[in-house]
Amino acid sequence: MGMEKNEILEIMGSPSRTQRFHGKDRWTYIFYETETRYEKEVHLDEGKAVYIGDIWNPPVENSAESVDTTHESQNKAYIESIELQSKENKSKSFSDYVLRTKGEDKIRYLPTFKQIK
């Protein structure tokens, strides 16, 4: 820990894999002992080693299934609110229509026709 890039390269040689991850260089070294394969990583921040050890896997905060479940419940709630709003609008529109036309005997619309020759 704390070694410079060039010191690591002198001791370990070139890494098998390099990657840039969250602003840090991530070097992977692969070793074989008889038939067993080992992978070790070195993470470098601003040119100095800040992590040396086994392959680092970031923790998974949300699995795909939990995200899908959350989205499905959000979609269901949204659809229910749209259906409720639609029912309210339909009943309001009909009651407004009844109030506007109640007791009125005049014709609101009379189509006009042109004679076709």
Image (cartoon, grey):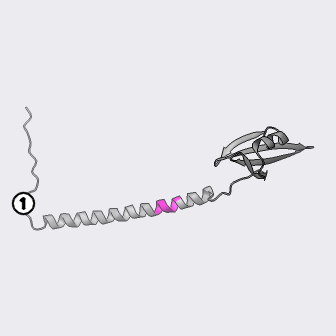
**Majority secondary structure in the magenta region:** helix
Q: Is residue 103 highlighted in magenta?
A: no
Q: Closer to the camera, 6 or 27?
A: 6
Q: Residue at x 8, y 39 (%)?
A: 114
In the picture, measured across the screen, residue 99 lies left or right of residue 14, that is left
Q: Secondary structure at mark 1?
A: loop
Residue 73 percent coordinates (x, y): 51, 63
Using the image as rendered, state which of residue 115 and residue 16 is in the foreground: 16
The quarter of the rendered structure image containing the C terminus is top left
Q: Quadrant of residue 108?
A: bottom left
Specify whether 64 is left or right of 12: left
Question: Which residue is depicted at the point 77% across and 44% down?
Answer: 28
Q: Which residue is mark 1?
A: 106
Residue 46 image point, x, y percent: 68, 47
Vertical placement of residue 62 versus 28, above or below: below
The magenta-colored residue range is: 71-76
